[in-house]
Image (cartoon, rainbow, N blue to C red):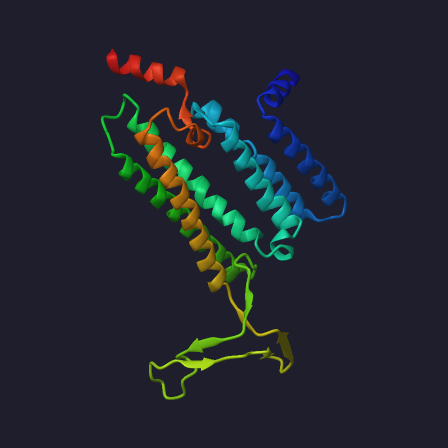
Amino acid sequence: MKSKIKSHIKSKSIVNLILSIIVAVVLVARFLRGDYYSVFLCLLTLLLFNIPLFVDKKLNVSLPKELEAIILLFIFSAEILGEIGSFYTHIPWWDTMLHTINGFLMAAIGFALIDILNNSPKFHINMSPMFVAFVAFCFSMTVGVVWEFFEFFMDYFTLTDMQKDRMVLDISSVLLNPTGLNDEIIIKGIEKTTLTLADGSTYVIEGGYLDIGIIDTMKDLFVNLIGAVVFSVIGFFYIIGRNKGVFAKKFIPQMKEKEVKRETETVEN
């Protein structure tokens, strides 16, 4: 048992070990405070930290150290800093940054999946660089849309605030038109909103009108698009100048050489 633990620790990168130790410390501290939701997030984070190891051992895919570090820091920034450390509310651009990186990472994963198939002797396909880049872009955007669906359903059914509402000073809506016509009513310069509750009490929202998630969702999808486009362009030029793009290699997973040889021998036999 001890040998397995030592082997597991050795297989982890330095970044993984450092972040895992920090998460473990946070986990203990939150447990002692009775914050069991944060404890769950810490356990989830430690589980997600094993994704690079799983990909390496089970899927025989080698992740560049740079890509692995970005994935680990992304998970840490989202779960520990973002959720437990409240960076999402304290730092306005935190969520935007993470969604941009997510678009980049998902495009890298989508690109790698197609590129590995493209170069595998088992599959007789030969997709053009433009098509591979396009598939990577579509994969990234699909993941981004599915995540926004998840945020919406969580907010709608469990009353969380994953979509992160924000204040707006101007609104435009046809629903406010008393004639029922499809002509919007524009209201500008909103300073506060007063809500009347079912029991007759009121709740005042200072600073404007509360937008329920739509701006955040569209912003997240837009920055996801930026990240996806950036990597798709990198991937496109990587395929054109195969083995020449030193920068691109740092972010593109590769099938292990042993596995490639095994596939080649299987096809030949």
* Identity of the residue drawn at 40% across and 50% down: 225
Can the viewer see residue 196?
Answer: no
Q: Position of residue 49 (x, y in %)?
A: 57, 34
Measured along the vertical axis of the image, is residue 260 above or below residue 36?
above
Drawn side of residue 160 relative to residue 176, left or right? right
Q: Residue at x 64, y 29 (%)?
A: 17
x 59%, y 44%: residue: 77
- Residue furthest to the bottom: 179
Relative height, residue 173 to residue 94 (above, below):
below
Near-viewer residue (199 or 237): 237
- Residue 72 in view of the camera: yes
Instruction: Residue 251: give x, y in percent of width and height.
Output: 45, 32
**Residue 169: % across, % down:** 54, 74
Q: In the rendered view of the protein, which quadrant contains the N terminus?
A: top right
- Between 10 and 240, the one lying in front of the other is 240
Which residue is at a point 41% across and 37% down the rendered structure image? 108
| Residue 166 position by quadrant | bottom right
Question: Which quadrant of the figure contains the C terminus?
Answer: top left
Residue 177 appears in which quarter of the rendering? bottom left
